[in-house]
Amino acid sequence: VFIWEYNIPVPAKYISEPHMNAIPHVELHPSTNFWCGQSLNNQVVTYQARDKLKQLRKKTFTGHLCSGYACGLGFAPNGRYLASGDAEGRVFVWDFKSTRMLRKWHAHDAACLAVQWHPIEPSWLITAGWDGLLKLWD
């Protein structure tokens, strides 16, 4: 993971650990205090995004299959929920505070690569899959 300061073209911090897998997608929490990364070891990892960069090991989200895919993440506008697609076309929704999986469902016939909460209607979730479809969920 490379961390840059705004407007400075040189990485300010480089995080590399032997057990760390590639993180092809990151999403900033609406509070801007955290960011989550979709790790290719079938986990979503959380880092503190303020003064000191630190992985929050108790805030790891599991249960989905994303190895080999850059599946997207999305936070609900209020920051209470985190959603992710997976390689089997499913959507997962977790409670951000407890990391407990709240819901999962089959959304696409191929990998679900993007999920995004509607900014005004917080109960709506939009997904995109390799099956070429965009779907709106309520």
Image (spheres, rainbow, N blue to C red):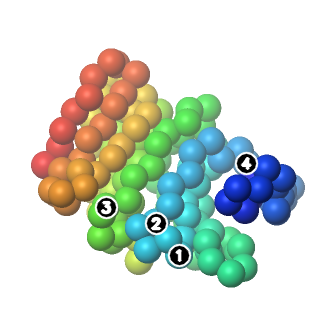
Marks 4 and 3 in Cβ contact (< 8 Å): no
Q: Is residue 100 visible?
A: no
Identify the image quadrant of residue 115: top left
Q: At 50% across and 71% down in the image, what residue appears? A: 32
Residue sitting nearer the eye, 98 or 32: 32
What is the number of the mark on residue 21?
Answer: 4
Q: Residue extending furthest top? A: 132
Query: Residues under labels 2 and 4: Cα distance?
Result: 21 Å
User: Percent from the top left, x then y, of residue 4?
Assistant: 74, 58
Q: Secondary structure at mark 1?
A: loop
What residue did someone put label 3 on? 76
Which tag, 1 or 4, sits closer to the chain's start?
4
- Amino acid at the residue labelled 4: Asn
What residue did someone put label 2 on? 29
User: Taking 35 as reference, is 95 left or right?
Assistant: left
What residue did someone put label 1 on? 33
Q: At 42% across and 29% down in the image, what residue appears? A: 111
Marks 2 and 1 in Cβ contact (< 8 Å): yes
Tell me the mark number nearer the camera, choosing from 3 and 1.
1
Q: At 41% across and 77% down in the image, what residue appears? A: 97
Query: Residues under labels 3 and 1: Cα distance?
Result: 15 Å
Tell me the mark number nearer the camera, choosing from 1 and 4.
1
Query: Residues under labels 2 and 3: Cα distance?
Result: 9 Å
- Amino acid at the residue labelled 3: Ala
Marks 2 and 3 in Cβ contact (< 8 Å): no
Which tag, 3 or 1, sits closer to the chain's start?
1
Tell me the mark number nearer the camera, choosing from 4 and 3.
3
Q: Secondary structure at mark 4?
A: loop
Q: Residue extending furthest front? A: 7
Which tag, 4 or 3, sits closer to the chain's start?
4
What is the number of the mark on residue 47?
Answer: none
